[in-house]
Amino acid sequence: MTTILIIIFVLGYLFIAFEHSFKINKAATALLTAALCWSVYALGTADKETVVHHLTEHLGDISGILFFLLGAMVIVELIDAHDGFELITRRIQTTDKKKLVWLLAFITFFLSAVLDNLTTTIVMVSLLRKLIGDRRERLLYAGLVVISANAGGAWSPIGDVTTTMLWIGGQITAVNIILKVLLPSLVSMLIPVLLISHQLKGNVAQRPEALQNKNFTYSAGERNLVFWLGVSCLLMVPVFKTITHLPPYMGILFGLGIMWVCTEMIHSKKDERDKGVLSVNHALRKIDTPSILFFLGILLCVAALESTEILHAAAAWLDKTIGNISAISITIGLLSALVDNVPLVAGAQGMYSLEQFPTDHYYWEFLAYCAGTGGSILIIGSAAGVAAMGLEKIDFFWYVKKIGWIALLGYLAGAVVFILQQFFV
C-alpha cells in the first residue's frame, strides 16, 4: 500500500508541476490524486472506521485554511471592484527608472503583507502596463514585482498561503513571524532591487495616460470607505485571534460579514444593475475557486501520506541524510521553485510534530521564509510568478536568464541573514 500511495502522489505531483505542458488544470489533478490516495488507504486497511476518523480529523484542519482563503479573496475582490487600489497606485508619479524600481519594490513588499502575494502581483503588473511602454523594461519590473510580492508575503501571517498554513496550524504566531522573518525577507528583496536598478538608466520611455476611474456607479467617498474598511478587516484578523483565541478563519469571516453588511448599506438605494458588480455576490463569483479546490486536493493528499506514516518516515530519512534543520529548510525553499510550495509546506508540517518542534521554533520560522521566497527563483515556482507569466506572457527561459539568478542571490542572502540573526539574537 505504501508503494502505491507514493507512486500515485508522485504522478499527481508531476502533473501539477507541469500543468502547462499537460494542459490539465492542477485543481483537477489534485482532487483526483486526493481521492485515489484515500481510496487506496481505505482499501488497504481492515479498520475502515479508523480511516474515516483520520479523514474527518484532517478535513477539520483543512477547512480552516480554505475558509480563511475564501474570506480573504472576497474582501480583496470587493476592494478591487471599487477601484480601491488606485488610492495606492495613482500616487506613483515618478518617471525616473531607478526611483521607479525602488518605489514599486517597497509598495509591492508591504502591500503583499496586507493582502497576499498573488493579488498584489496582479495589481502591480496591471499598473506597470499603464506606466511603462517598453515591454523589455516592463518585464524586468514585472520580475521584480514577483520577487517583492513573495518576499513581502513570507513575513506576514496573511501574506502568503504557506505562512497562513503554518499560522493556522499552530507552528508560528503572528507577532513572532513578523519579528523574525521581516529582516531576512527585506534583504531577499533589496539584493534584486540593487541589481535590477543598476541595469536601468534614464526615464521611462513612454508614460500612457494617467489612471482614470471609469466606473461612475460609486463616489470617491464610497471607494475610500471600502478600501480602508477592507484593509482594516484583514489587519484585525491577528488581533481577533489574540483576543478571542479562536482560529483565524473566524476572524476573516467576521471581517467579511462586516464588509458584506456595509457594502449592502452603501449601495442599497442604487439600481440593481449598478450595484451588482459591487456586491459580495459578484465577488464570490469572481474569486479563484479552482485555487481553493487545488488547496483542498493537495492538502488531502498530504493528509493521506501523514495518516499512513509515510511523512514521518521521510522526516527520519531527511534527519539521517541531511541532519541539519537549516539545510532541510533551504532545500525545501529551493524545491519550491520547481514545484508548488503548498504541498511542500503541508508535507513539512506532517513530518515534524509540535512536540518535536514547538510553536515559534526556529525551524518553522525559517521554513516560512524559505518556502515563501524560494518560489521566486523560477517563474513557475509561485502563484505570483504564474500570474505575472500569464499577464505579461513572460518566457520561462527569459526569466531564468534575467531574473532567476537575481532571485537566487536574494534568497540565499536572506537565508544567511536569518541564520545570523538567530545566532546573535
Image (tube, grey):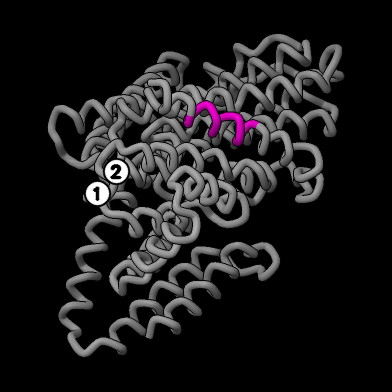
Picture coordinates of residue 341, whole percent (x, y): 50, 51
| First of labels 2, 1 by sequence position | 2
Tag 2, which secondary structure?
A: loop
Q: Nearer the viewer, residue 358 or 389?
A: 358
Q: Give, as a three-letter code, the residue at label 2.
A: Gln
Q: Which residues are magenta?
A: 410-419
Q: Could you tell me which quadrant the N terminus lies in?
A: bottom left
Q: Give, as a three-letter code, the residue at label 1.
A: Leu
Q: On residue 363, which mark appears?
A: none
Would you say residue 297 is visible in this rendering?
no
Q: Residues within 10 Å of mark 1 (few under 14, many from 20)?
A: some
Q: Residue at x 75, y 24 (%)?
A: 195
- Kindly check if marks 2 and 1 are in contact, taking CB atoms under 8 A apart as contact: yes
For label 1, the residue is 354
Would you say residue 321 is visible in this rendering?
yes
Q: Residue at x 44, y 34 (%)?
A: 159
Query: Image quadrant of residue 193?
Result: top right
Q: Chief secondary structure of the magenta span?
A: helix
Picture coordinates of residue 199, whole percent (x, y): 83, 22
